[in-house]
Image (cartoon, rainbow, N blue to C red):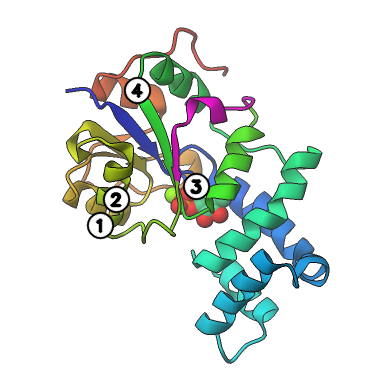
Amino acid sequence: MPPEAVVCDIEGTTSAIAFVKETLFPFAERALDGFLREHGAEPAVAAILDEVRALAPDQEPAEALRGWMARDEKVTPLKALQGMIWRQGFESGLIRGHLWPDVAPCLRAWAAAGVKLRIYSSGSVEAQKLLFGHSEAGDLTPILSGFDDTRTGPKREAESYAAIARSAGLPPGGMLFLSDVAEELDAARAAGMQVCQIVRPADGTVESGRHPACATFPEVATRFGLPAPDEPPPA
Ligand SMILES: CSCCC(=O)C(=O)COP(=O)(O)O
Ligand SMILES: [Mg+2]
């Protein structure tokens, strides 16, 4: 049966890994000290800094945050803070959310056919909404019906996917999870979801061999019985 809902990872799935590493992370790194000086006492930011101190009690929060960014560690308070910092970049037009050209036409076709679309990323829900709200393909947030980040649960644990299915009000088997990371797909499959690894050569993704694999979203459409977009994606 074709899935009633599609859940998309971002980095390596809808968007280039290079966009995250070479645009988003350096933006946050450059703005970090100024952001903490200006906003560090605000309750939402202060609460995140408390989480950072609890996880890295032997370091200054800025030092811990920089280390996590350098090692691309998906630590929840870092992700929350990055989302806050990126807001200014997205809203001023300095950053536009990268999407591979095959992604938006499929998401639009699937939404038009009544397929529910959700995002599950290590990037915070705030950052997800910014990326899809200010994407290279325009504002896609009206066609997205749910957003989850690591506050829902770790991406490599089956219970996180069970929670996403509960919040969508669907049986896990009616949902398809798309990700570049095999361990995330293992967890989603253990929760009963259909899964597909997105293997984009431009991202250097290695096919695990444990899951169905597709290089583009139109290939996903063909393989899982989802509608294909009316127009071919731009070259
Ligand atoms: C605007 S979302 C930022 C992406 C990000 O920070 C990240 O860690 C993405 O990880 P994913 O789980 O989507 O692979
Ligand atoms: Mg990913």
Could you tell me the amino acid type at mark 2? Ala
Q: Tell me where residue 120 appears, x and y as whole percent.
A: 42, 46
Q: Tell me where residue 229 appears, x and y as whole percent.
A: 43, 13
Residue bearing mark 1? 159
Picture disc at residue 129: none
Q: CA distance from mark 4 to mark 3?
A: 22 Å
**Pair 2/3: label in front:** 2
Asked if the residue under mark 1 is in contact with the one under mark 2, i.e. CB atoms within 8 Å, the reply is: yes
Residue bearing mark 4? 115
**Pair 4/2: label in front:** 2
Q: Residue furthest top?
A: 230
Could you tell me the amino acid type at mark 1? Glu
- The answer to whether residue 175 is visible is yes
Would you call the spot at circle 1 few (<14 residues within 10 Å), some (14-19), or many (20 or more)?
some
Residue bearing mark 3? 11
Residue at (76%, 40%) from the top-left corner? 91
Could you say which quadrant of the image residue 65 lies in?
bottom right
Image-based side of 197 in relation to 172, left or right: right
Could you say which quadrant of the image residue 41 lies in?
bottom right
Would you call the spot at circle 2 few (<14 residues within 10 Å), some (14-19), or many (20 or more)?
some
> Which is more toward the observer, 114 or 69?
114
Could you tell me the amino acid type at mark 3? Glu
Q: Where, quadrant-wise, is the N terminus in this rendering?
A: top left
